[in-house]
Image: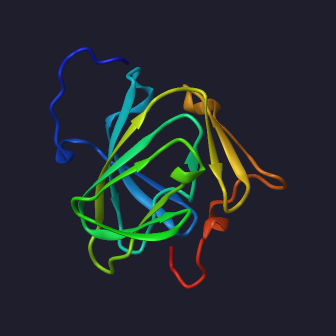
Amino acid sequence: MHDDQLKITRLEQISPVHTQFGEHDEFERFPVIPRDAGHQCGVYFYRLPPGKANFPYHYHEVNEEVFYIISGNGIVLTEDGEKTISAGDVIFCPPAPGGAHKIANTSANEPLVYIEFDSVRYPDVVHYPKTGAFGILRHDSVDNEFFREGPQLDYAAEVETPDRDW
């Protein structure tokens, strides 16, 4: 459904969708402008529990992502290693291997809250460099497909660093 009216909302007014991939990646996502709403961008609030991360380490071929950290502390895993992030930081991920990322909450007791702004162009290909997996994202998310040499994508295999819980 494509909205054609100005929209004002707050995090507290949006029902979260809880998502978990394996043991380490877990978050609540609050859709402001869902990717399937027919707009040119998608906007979501995220809340990561302490010690958890968002999606497996990945990058897109087509869509850009921008994250604004609202509260909490964490790291973003990049192709150059871990970068510390905190409230007020803005992260831009271009659609290229250099834009590969994974956001994790390093706090022991405080959630990491951020807002994500994405371009919405389909089809898109998402690469998971640590496993060699990739996904083809289509406008209708029901038709998304994920592949890798060998078995299907296993999110539990996305643990980047053995000494971390995420």
* Residue furthest out toward the right: 150
Name the foreground residue: 129 vs 114. Answer: 129
Residue drawn at the location 27% of the way across and 59% of the way down: 89
Is residue 155 rendered to the left or right of residue 133?
left
Residue 7 in the image, given as x and y percentages of width and height? 18, 26
In the rendered image, the vertical position of residue 61 relative to residue 27, given as above or below: above
Of the pair 9 and 72, the residue shown nearer to us: 72
Establish if 115 lies above or below 3.
below
> Which quadrant would residue 160 be assigned to in this image?
bottom right
Residue at the image point whose x is 45% and y is 27% from the top = 36
144 or 102, which is in the foreground?
A: 102
Q: Position of residue 15 (x, y in %)?
A: 28, 44
Report whether 105 appears left or right of 125.
Answer: left
Rendering coords of residue 54 (x, y %): 46, 59
Q: Quadrant of residue 119?
A: top left
Q: Is residue 158 left or right of residue 67?
A: right
